Image (spheres, rainbow, N blue to C red):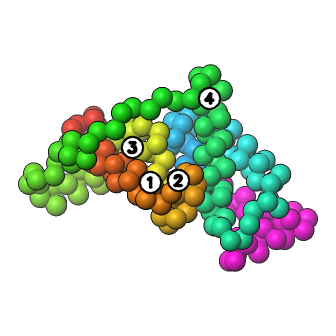
Amino acid sequence: MGDDGALVQQAVAGDRGAYDALVARWRGPLYRFARRLLHDDAAAEDVLQDTFLTVHRRLADWRAEGSFKSWLFSIARNQVLMLRRRRVGEPATHEPLESLAELGAAAGWGQVMSPHALTERLEQHTQLEQALASLDDEAREVLLLRDVEGLSGEDTAQALGLTLPAMKSRLHRARLRLVAAVKRGALP
């Protein structure tokens, strides 16, 4: 069950210190996730607060068979989606999918670029953040959960409400879009 499972059990039993320990452990990763999705510090704080309120109310509902981490990120993601809907008044629209060949060409498949040159471009944190920000919400979510926050494939799929194959497909497309954004100069 791990440290989180033991803390959850203690928190459900009324141990305020255990709940505070869960908040302290997950505050940074959840805030970072919300901030990168929303590009707004205040909105990310609102999502964080709403996430932990939901967690507090539903902590006894968490089942130890699943990952606590994916459960938390799923709640945070839902809070982000609700905030977006409140702001706009309707769900986000989806763009049509490009073919894998189009994404691959945009990402530079078949083009010769030295690993050193590519590494130098990617090492610039600000540029990478801007490329990440240029992606659609679905691509950014899957990249943040899997590649930045380090959730397993299964946990990422669970947090996004997808099957594992669907998550893998979305992740592959998102990685190609990120590389394409860097290569096409979507960066300053």
Label 2 sits on what residue type?
A: Leu
Q: Mark 4 vs mark 1: which is more N-terminal?
A: 4
Which residue has dot 1 on it?
Answer: 166
Q: Does the magenta-highlighted stretch encompass residue 25?
A: yes
Label 4 sits on what residue type?
A: Arg
For the residues labelled 1 and 2, say whether their Cβ atoms are less than 8 Å apart: yes
> In the figure, is residue 70 to the left or right of 122?
right
The C terminus is located in which quarter? top left
Which residue has dot 4 on it?
Answer: 85
User: In 3D space, how far apart are the residues under numbered discs 2 and 4 (Cα atoms)?
Assistant: 20 Å
Tell me which segment is drawn in magenta: 1-29
> In the figure, is residue 120 to the left or right of 21?
left
Give the camera-side residue of 55 and 92: 92
In this rendering, which labeled residue sits more in front, label 1 or label 3? Answer: 1
For the residues labelled 4 and 1, say whether their Cβ atoms are less than 8 Å apart: no
Residue 47's x, y, as percent? 66, 41
Which residue has dot 3 on it?
Answer: 132
Q: Residue 162 has which mark? A: 2
Residue at 48% from the left image edge and 29% from the top image edge: 93
Q: Mark 2 vs mark 4: which is more N-terminal?
A: 4
Circle 3 SS class: helix
Q: Mark 3 vs mark 2: which is more N-terminal?
A: 3
In this rendering, which labeled residue sits more in front, label 2 or label 4? Answer: 2
Q: Is residue 105 above or below residue 156?
A: above
For the residues labelled 1 and 3, say whether their Cβ atoms are less than 8 Å apart: no
Q: Is residue 124 visible?
A: no
User: In 3D space, how far apart are the residues under numbered discs 4 and 1 (Cα atoms)?
Assistant: 24 Å
